[in-house]
Image (spheres, rainbow, N blue to C red):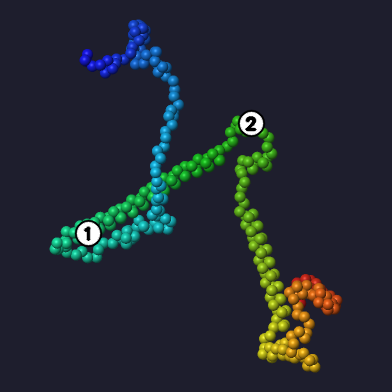
């Protein structure tokens, strides 16, 4: 090894001469240590659990969302009936002869392999789904039981002794929480439904009564129709312009129909107080009696 350069020669472990010459008779510890006292690693200093932050590897692309092969209501996919329907065997197998026999035989083997893989794949996926659901339900049951145990756990003695003074009513609320009363909400909903039904019934009765009162002017026979036509289209005798549409008064506008008390006054016609009073009395009577008059 003398022909090797100095840098290539194997380096021996450094041992302090002063430490190696020390004699410790009454000790079970050896004289030579793997780490010398001069080394900074001689004293074991605890290090944090995460000395170096691990960088996450960036994966390019986005994986598609896996398809749910067994949605709700489709548990029959793993049944023999469904598997027989999707992997039907051929009714007849042709005799493979001639130059194309080997190729057709290969195609039959491939078809059998696809049917087998589909059947086994569906069964394996259904088994894996069932196993994962059982594990998930088991974890949920554990968490639920742990939560219920914590909720039902009695108050600790130190908390009871150090808590501030709270009234008894609030203490029960804080301890038990808000309790949902389904009977109270059911009674409120029942009253609201009954009120709406009463309003609808009154509206229907009012509409039927109004229709009955308006039916007095309905034309139901042929004689009534002839009389209405004669009254509407009869000419006035003794007037020179009996065929003019402007012979009579000015027709009522929409504003006159909405406000009949101001319509005649705006057109310069006399406004009869008796007619207005009669209309008002009629409306008051309708409000008092609760029906159309």
Give the residue displayed 36% in from the left and 8% down from the top.
19
Kindly identify the residue that appears in the image at 75 percent across and 91 percent down.
Answer: 235
* Identity of the residue furthest to the bottom in this view: 238
- Is residue 94 left or right of 215 when viewed as pictured? left
Residue under label 2, please give it.
Answer: 162
Residue at position x 43%, y 28% from top? 51
| Discs 2/1, front | 1
Residue identified by numbered label 1? 108
Relative height, residue 264 to residue 59 (above, below): below
Residue 233 image point, x, y percent: 72, 89
Decide if residue 136 is in sight here.
yes
Q: Quadrant of residue 32?
A: top left
Q: Quadrant of residue 154?
A: top right
First reached walking from the N terminus: tag 2 or tag 1: 1
Is label 2 in contact with label 1 (beta carbons under 8 Å)?
no
Q: Position of residue 293 (x, y in %)?
A: 76, 77
- Tell me the element at label 2: helix
Question: Could you classify mark 2 by the number of other residues whose Cα lies within 10 Å: few (under 14), some (14-19), or many (20 or more)?
Answer: few
- In space, the residues marked 2 and 1 are separated at their CA atoms by 82 Å
Q: Residues within 10 Å of mark 1 (few under 14, many from 20)?
A: some
From this view, report whether residue 119 is shown above or below residue 208.
above
**Picture coordinates of residue 125, whole percent (x, y):** 35, 51
In terms of secondary structure, where does tag 1 sit? helix
Q: Choose between 147 and 48: the one closer to the eye.
A: 48
Where residue 26 sits: x, y (%)? 37, 7
Q: Please name whichever residue, 228 or 175, is drawn nearer the observer in this view of the structure.
A: 228
Left or right: residue 240 compared with residue 152:
right
């Amino acid at each position: 090894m003398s022909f090797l350069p100095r840098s290539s020669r194997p380096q021996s472990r450094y041992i302090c001469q002063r430490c190696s010459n020390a004699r410790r008779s009454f000790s079970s510890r050896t004289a030579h240590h793997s780490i010398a006292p001069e080394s900074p690693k001689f004293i074991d200093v605890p290090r944090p659990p995460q000395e170096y932050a691990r960088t996450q590897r960036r994966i390019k692309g986005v994986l598609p969302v896996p398809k749910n092969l067994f949605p709700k209501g489709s548990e029959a996919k793993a049944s023999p009936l469904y598997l027989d329907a999707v992997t039907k065997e051929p009714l007849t197998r042709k005799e493979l002869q001639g130059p194309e026999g080997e190729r057709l035989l290969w195609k039959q083997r491939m078809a059998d392999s696809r049917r087998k893989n589909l059947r086994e794949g569906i069964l394996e996926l259904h088994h894996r789904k069932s196993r994962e659901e059982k594990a998930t339900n088991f974890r949920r049951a554990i968490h639920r039981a742990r939560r219920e145990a914590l909720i039902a756990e009695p108050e600790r003695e130190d908390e009871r002794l150090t808590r501030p003074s709270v009234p008894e009513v609030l203490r029960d609320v804080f301890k038990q929480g808000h309790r949902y009363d389904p009977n109270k909400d059911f009674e409120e909903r029942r009253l609201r439904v009954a009120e709406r039904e009463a309003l609808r019934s009154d509206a229907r009765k009012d509409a039927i009564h109004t229709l009955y009162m308006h039916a007095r002017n309905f034309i139901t026979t042929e004689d009534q129709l002839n009389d209405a036509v004669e009254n509407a289209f009869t000419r006035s005798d003794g007037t020179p312009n009996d065929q003019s549409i402007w012979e009579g008064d000015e027709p009522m506008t929409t504003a006159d129909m909405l406000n009949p008390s101001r319509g005649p006054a705006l057109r310069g016609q006399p406004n009869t107080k008796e007619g207005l009073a009669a209309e008002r009395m009629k409306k008051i009577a309708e409000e008092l009696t609760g029906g159309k008059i």
